[in-house]
């Protein structure tokens, strides 16, 4: 049975982040209190061409609930085919990426580039809508740059063509991931459409989520970089929204325990040494703000085996009390090159150039 979009999008959710929110990260987030997760962006061209690697990404999603699968592309027939195939696999929703600014996506005419061709955008949304009865959302940015703010026009078309929800990352393409997200745009969107609106950009904890909801009236909140090394953020936000109080920060022993489980899940999905390499950034994120982390990471970054990493982490943690909390609990935004760090090596995106 498909979910009622009104309630489906009225929650706190994990954003799609290429190279970060793989199945392992989504599982950990869910186990730590996240009610809804989005897949990384997946190429509709890859799906339409039945590309082995792209289909493997979908296969991974098969038993995950609740999950929204995000697709990107520019070919209406391929998007329709992708939406049909995804619906058969049975996630809980489909999302269309209208915000990705990465060069290899934009140059292909997908991601935010689609919002500069509104007739094509309308056709794509119509085709996807016709191919699925699942909750169907679009995730967009405010526009190309300060001179080209298009989200209200994009939203009008998307609503007319029957989407069930909209997510707005309150930045333009030109802003990248820098500066502050401009939340008033989220409020403008909420006033302009009748479908649920999810606000996104710079939510870092319970108070900032509450502030976004109060200032914009958005129905749901999406968290991206604030979840780096902090899968507990979803529980924290939910508790704060319910009680105006945050739970105490998570201590070292629990962090290590969840990090170790995260490492095992990544390696289970991607094997050694790839999974171990991919976990290096997570080690830094989970343990940010503890003493001597730099030195420990220097060691871990040379290890190739899961067991060696786990032993190194546990040895390092022995020097501290198990309930020690980090000096800085606030998760900082990713560096501006975070996108290339995560996105350039994504198989789904590499396929774009292979397949077009
Ligand atoms: C490394 C990286 C990869 C991302 N990948 C995607 C993606 O695959 N699909 C998407 O819609 N947004 C993607 N985003 C954007 C995030 O979903 C989110 O909109 C953005 O980070 C702002 O939210 P935040 O301030 O909570 O991080 C990515 C962001 C980063 C930093």
Image (cartoon, grey):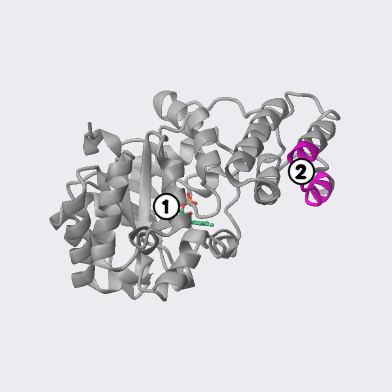
**Residue 46 within the segment the image draws in magenta:** no
When the figure is inspected, residue 167 is found, relative to residue 73, above or below; the finding is above
Q: Is mark 1 within 8 Å of ligand 1?
A: no
Image height of 214 relative to 140, above or below: above
Which x, y percent locates residue 117?
25, 74
Q: Which image quadrant: the N terminus?
A: top left
Could you tell me which residue is drawn at 76 percent across and 24 percent down? 322
Nearer to the camera, 294 or 219: 294
Quarter location, residue 189: bottom left
User: Do callouts 2 and 1 mark residues in contact (Cβ within 8 Å)?
Assistant: no
Query: Which of the numbered marks, if any, corresponds to residue 316?
Result: none
Q: Residues within 10 Å of mark 2 (few under 14, many from 20)?
A: some
**Along the viewing direction, whichever of 177 and 310 lies nearer the viewer:** 310
Quadrant containing the C terminus is: bottom left
Magenta span contains residue 300: yes
Identify which residue, 5 or 267, lies in the foreground: 267
Q: In the rendered structure, which segment of residues is drawn in magenta?
A: 296-309
Whether disc 2's CB lies below 8 Å from ligand 1 is answered no
In terms of sequence position, does the residue under pointer 2 or pointer 1 come before the other?
1
Q: Would you name the residue on which mark 1 appears?
A: 55
What is the spatial separation of the Cα atoms under label 2 and label 1, in whole angstroms?
28 Å
Whether residue 216 can be seen here: no
Q: In the figure, is residue 85 to the left or right of 105?
A: left
- Total of numbered circles in the picture? 2
Helix, strand or loop: magenta stretch: helix
Q: Where is 305 relative to 344, above or below?
A: above
Residue 9: x, y in percent?
A: 30, 39
Q: Where is residue 131 in the image (x, y as percent from the top left)?
A: 20, 51
Q: Is residue 356 above or below residue 20?
A: below
């Amino acid at each position: 049975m498909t979910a009622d979009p009104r309630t489906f999008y009225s929650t706190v959710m994990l954003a799609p982040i290429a190279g970060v929110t793989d199945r392992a990260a989504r599982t950990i987030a869910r186990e730590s209190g996240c009610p809804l997760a989005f897949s990384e962006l997946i190429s509709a061209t890859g799906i339409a061409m039945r590309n082995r690697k792209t289909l493997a990404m979908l296969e991974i999603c098969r038993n995950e609930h609740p999950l929204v699968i995000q697709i990107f592309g520019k070919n209406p027939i391929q998007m329709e085919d992708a939406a049909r195939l995804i619906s058969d696999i049975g996630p809980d929703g489909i999302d269309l990426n209208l915000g990705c600014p990465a060069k290899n996506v934009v140059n292909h005419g997908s991601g935010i580039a689609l919002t500069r061709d509104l007739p094509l955008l309308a056709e794509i949304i119509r085709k996807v809508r016709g191919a699925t009865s699942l909750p169907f959302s679009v995730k967009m940015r405010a526009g190309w740059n300060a001179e080209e703010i298009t989200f209200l026009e994009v939203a009008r078309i998307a609503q007319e063509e029957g989407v069930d929800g909209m997510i707005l990352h309150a930045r333009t393409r030109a802003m990248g991931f820098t500066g502050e997200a401009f939340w008033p745009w989220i409020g403008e969107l909420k006033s302009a459409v009748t479908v649920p609106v999810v606000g996104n950009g710079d939510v870092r904890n319970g108070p900032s989520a509450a502030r976004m909801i109060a200032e914009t009236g958005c129905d749901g909140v999406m968290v991206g970089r604030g979840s780096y090394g902090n899968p507990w953020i979803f529980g924290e936000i939910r508790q704060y929204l319910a009680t105006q109080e945050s739970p105490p920060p998570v201590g070292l022993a629990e962090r290590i325990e969840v990090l170790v489980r995260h490492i095992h899940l990544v390696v289970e999905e991607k094997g050694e040494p790839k999974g171990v390499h991919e976990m290096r950034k997570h080690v830094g994120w989970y343990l940010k703000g503890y003493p001597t982390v730099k030195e420990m990471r220097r060691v871990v970054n040379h290890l190739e085996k899961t067991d060696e990493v786990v032993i190194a982490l546990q040895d390092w943690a022995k020097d501290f009390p198990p309930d020690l909390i980090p000096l800085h609990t606030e998760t900082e935004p990713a560096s501006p090159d975070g996108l290339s760090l995560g996105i350039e090596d994504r198989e789904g995106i590499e396929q774009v150039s292979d397949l077009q």
